[in-house]
Amino acid sequence: MPLRHLTPHDQHLFRQYGRGPIVPVPDPLLHHAVTRHAAAAPHAVAAEHEGARITYAELDRYADALAARLVREGVRPGDHVGLFVRRSIPMLVGLLGILKAGAAYVPQDIGLAPPAQLTHVVRTARTRIVLTTTEHAHRVPLPDGHTLIPLDEPLPYAPAPRPRVTGDDGAYVLFTSGTTGRPNGVKVTHRNVANLLLTEPGGLGVRPGDRVAQLLNIAFDMAAWEILGCLTHGGTLVIRGKDIAAAARTADVLIATPTVLSGLDPAACPRVRTVAVAGEPCPRPLADRWARQAAFHNCCGPTETTIVNTMSRHDPSAPLLTIGRPTPNNTVYVLDADRRPLPIGETGEMWAGGDCVSAGYLGDDALNAERYAPDPFLGGDRRMFRTRDLGRWTPDGELEHLGRTDDQVKVRGFRVELDAVSSILESAAGCTRAVTLKRDARTLVSFVCPADVDPDAARRAVADALPYYCVPEQVLPLALLPETDRGKVDKRALLGMLEHRVAVAR
């Protein structure tokens, strides 16, 4: 019995806290939900982008024609089709058409992804067909025998094909940052995604007519939450142009990383009633500010556990900002290094189980064996995933996120949690964002926003709260933190900035 080392009380709480509610999912096939909305409200606006609009009937009809073309090209369930696009209405036609053909879409932002990455994606995901727009066709590296289909060229109408697709077939393949320097392709199924988007709180209460902002890079899994979370509930997707704030101003629902959200002013977004953040730790001041205006969900989960697998609606008066509890039909276990459950309140590594657990990495058996394992708590053929997130249960059953195992560093021989240092800095007067990095074996450096934060006062805040080896040697105030193309803090750029300052000082 995997729990026999725990006290009876902790065994009870392990089961009570670690299991999300069992909830039926209406239909595991995502495109079915979109088609139902097209039939129920054909003239409702599915999406708008820079003045252009598309109704649900138009989106469904164009996607049917594309799906028919893909099937004529030999696409079958289990195949992967590249979707190399920029944010646009054709992006939605391509995504839905691929799903209707029974295949999984493989998204890349054609304006940002370097050629070597696109080549790697095509090879690893075996995308024999790639969809793009005429404008960007020259950027797609296609080997001989592969087909490129422009999304902005009209197709003759054809009825939707009816491939035999199940919930266990792939919906998308996302490429995450890999430990080898090459991104790893993660296959996520319809059942995985529907389990989050078609239950609450993952559905975020989206209803027909609601406006959902589409702010994020399509290659980032949270973009699937924006796009499919909107279209499967009959909302209107507000696809941003260059101005993020313009899209957010007219939206009812925002899904973002904390870095992206920190660039938006709640006062300028009066319609927003629901916000969800994930992808990186959320600063408490940011959560408090938005939670005073909207239902604010702090969420956590890597791509491999399907966007997020824990959610918490934050109350500004709460003593802690937590990542909440497992979402429906999912589980979370806090385990020690031997994969044994820890008593409630002890810090360990979070493993995720249930319907969120994705199908695994493409063509990497060694990595699959390292990160996925049989789930001894659910049993049968269920698997669990090693998130590499550190956490602990609060006495009332909320999960505290305590950083990443790979954010634990050694400084002067002591183990330091970089996120813990940043969290203290964010409690200092005037500081809204902080990032702490290891500079060398003896020193840490922190970057804080905004530019008028007092660096000495910020260092004192850390010194008053944490041991001496956690105190950053430098605290560098910045007006803005640099972002990656996925809307997270660009730590590599920060280290480059630091090296440049040192070189100039010499």
Image: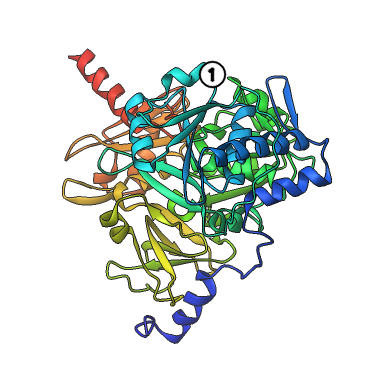
For label 1, count other residues whose C-alpha is less than 10 Å away and answer few (under 14), some (14-19) or many (20+): few
Residue at 71% x, 33% y: name it: 157
Position of 411 with respect to 273 (left or right) is left
Q: Quadrant of residue 476?
A: top left
Residue 391 in the image, given as x and y percentages of width and height: 41, 59
Residue 434 in the image, given as x and y percentages of width and height: 42, 36
Residue 389 versus residue 22 in the image, above or below:
above
Residue at 16% x, 46% y: name it: 412
- Rendering colour mode: rainbow
Image quarter in which the C terminus is found: top left
Kind of residue at badge 1: Thr
Q: Nearer the viewer, residue 78 or 450?
A: 78
Residue 271 in the image, given as x and y percentages of width and height: 75, 35
Residue 304 versus residue 457 in the image, above or below:
below
Residue 358 in the image, given as x and y percentages of width and height: 45, 56
| Residue 291 visible within the image | no
Q: Nearer the viewer, residue 230 or 366?
A: 366
Residue at 43% x, 44% y: name it: 423
Image quarter in which the N terminus is found: bottom left
Could you say whether the residue bearing mark 1 is in a helix, strand or loop? helix
Residue 291 versus residue 246 in the image, above or below:
below
Position of 443 with respect to 356 (left or right) is left
Tally of numbered discs? 1
* Residue indicated by mark 1: 134
| Residue 38 visible within the image | yes
Residue at 32% x, 70% y: name it: 339
Q: Nearer the viewer, residue 438 or 305?
A: 305
